[in-house]
Image (cartoon, helix red, strand yellow):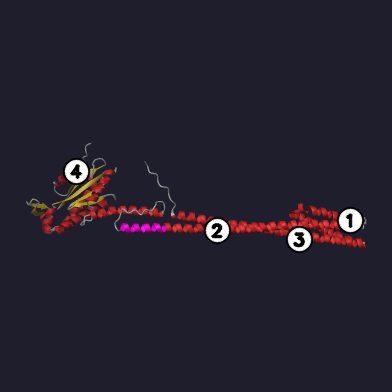
Amino acid sequence: MKRKPLPRRLTLIQKLMASYAAIAFFSTAAILFSINGLYSLNKIAKDIARDDFAVINASNQLLDSVNAQERTAAKYSILKSPEFIELFRKRELEFLDTLREMRHAGVADRLVPVSGAYENFRASAELLFQEKTQSLHEIKLSAEDVRSSIDKFYIDQQLLLKAKLDKANKKQDQTIRWSFLISFAGFLLAVCVIVVFIYNTSSSLKKLKRATFRIAEGDFDYDPQIPEGDEFGDLARDFTRMASKLKVLEQISLDASPLTRLPGNIAIEKVLDRKLQEEHPFAVCYADLDNFKAYSDRYGYVKGSEVIKITGEIIYDVVKRHSSEDAFVGHVGGDDFVMIIPTEDVNAVCTAVIDTFTVKIREHYSPEDLKKGALEGKDRYGVHRIFPIMTISIAVLTCKKGEYDSAVKIAKAAVQIKEYVKETPGSNYLINRRRKER
């Protein structure tokens, strides 16, 4: 069953951006709420200043006007002077103008009783001015009705003003309270985000530091146990991958030849096993020095080791120049080397190795031996023989997926080819293109 991929976690930048966005949201909300509250308070204050105070002041003016009109009417009833009628008319116009302005302030409905009482007062005054009555009693009663209606209006207006002031106070308290709560929530969120971020960062850094120490100590299988998804998770995965590669490199290093520094048998076997699983064909080239024992017996162990080292360098340099980056060079041991290269590079690599070795090996013989073209010595069986100048034989085995089961079978097949090619005088290479029968 195919494993479902884990959901991608937010990166550090995304986490910071999301947290700052939330903080900015709360801060903006607090500012907007405060602005809205201040706007509402300012509107209420303007309404009070423009309407309520003006209406209350106008009601006092109405009261003063009706009192003045009553006094003027009383003086007229005694002195009968037309001047008092003119004064009454001025005050009357003043009263009506004030009443008209108050209606424009939006209190027309509540001014109906005042208007009705005032019309009665005017009617009583007209009767007096037309000398249809001599009594001031009706004027006083109607004036008292006007004052009562104005007082009632004044009291009602005071109650409305008090209600608006109470509403403004509540709005102010609400604005302060919610602005504080939203700001505190934003601050608390910022603190939580900082604490969580610092904790996660510190925890991940400690785990990575511990992983670095463990890997440095050679524990290449150590897992930092950091969840994947962010930069720390990616870094932990890279640490694990690096540790795996270091483990392989350490094994290769431990297996490598101390003389040539080339990978040994373990690495060779791993490369062959990997190549056998791939689709691309490849060639395994086993290189062996001819007459090496006779040279080592004549010139000594140190010179023999030097020749092996030089041979490894020649093979490595040639493969690096004439083959792909995926090519591999290994040192089986002694004077045996392995090259694992693409099949199309075989001729170029083998020819270059032979040509370079043929030139370089002569630098390691004395002029006398080079003049003779051979060495005298005993073979491995103790028989006295003549050994020519050292040559190199290369047995090439071309392989592809499905032909060989393991590196061991490849090695056995290559031995047969190597034995055959070593029987041929001089430096040679032989390619075996036979395929395994199915």
Query: Looking at the picture, how far across and down is residue 437, in whole percent?
Result: 21, 37
For the stretch drawn in magenta, what is the main secondary structure? helix
Query: Looking at the picture, how far across and down is residue 111, in whole percent?
Result: 78, 54
Q: Separation of disc 2 and disc 4 at Cα?
A: 81 Å
User: What amino acid is labelled 4 in the image?
Assistant: Ala
Q: Which residues are magenta?
A: 201-216
The residue beneath circle 4 is 413
2 and 4 marks in contact (CB < 8 Å): no
Q: Quadrant of the C terminus?
A: top left
The residue beneath circle 2 is 183
Sequence-wise, which precedes: disc 2 or disc 4? 2
Q: Separation of disc 3 and disc 1 at Cα?
A: 28 Å
Between 275 and 37, the one lying in front of the other is 37
Check residue 288 in the rendering and tell me which mark sits there, or answer none.
none
| SS assignment at label 2 | helix
User: What amino acid is labelled 3 in the image?
Assistant: Asn
Sequence-wise, which precedes: disc 3 or disc 1? 3
Q: Separation of disc 3 and disc 4 at Cα?
A: 121 Å
- Graded by Cα atoms within 10 Å as few (under 14), some (14 to 19) or many (20 or more), the crowding at tag 2 reads some
4 and 1 marks in contact (CB < 8 Å): no
Sequence-wise, which precedes: disc 3 or disc 4? 3
Sequence-wise, which precedes: disc 2 or disc 3? 3
| SS assignment at label 1 | helix
The image quarter in which residue 174 lies:
bottom right
Check residue 126 in the rendering and tell me which mark sits there, or answer none.
1
Q: Depth-wise, is mark 3 or mark 4 nearer the camera?
A: 3
Check residue 57 in the rendering and tell me which mark sits there, or answer none.
3
Query: Looking at the picture, how far across and down is residue 410, in whole percent?
Result: 21, 44
Residue drawn at x 80%, y 60% as measured from the top left: 63
Q: Separation of disc 1 and disc 2 at Cα?
A: 68 Å
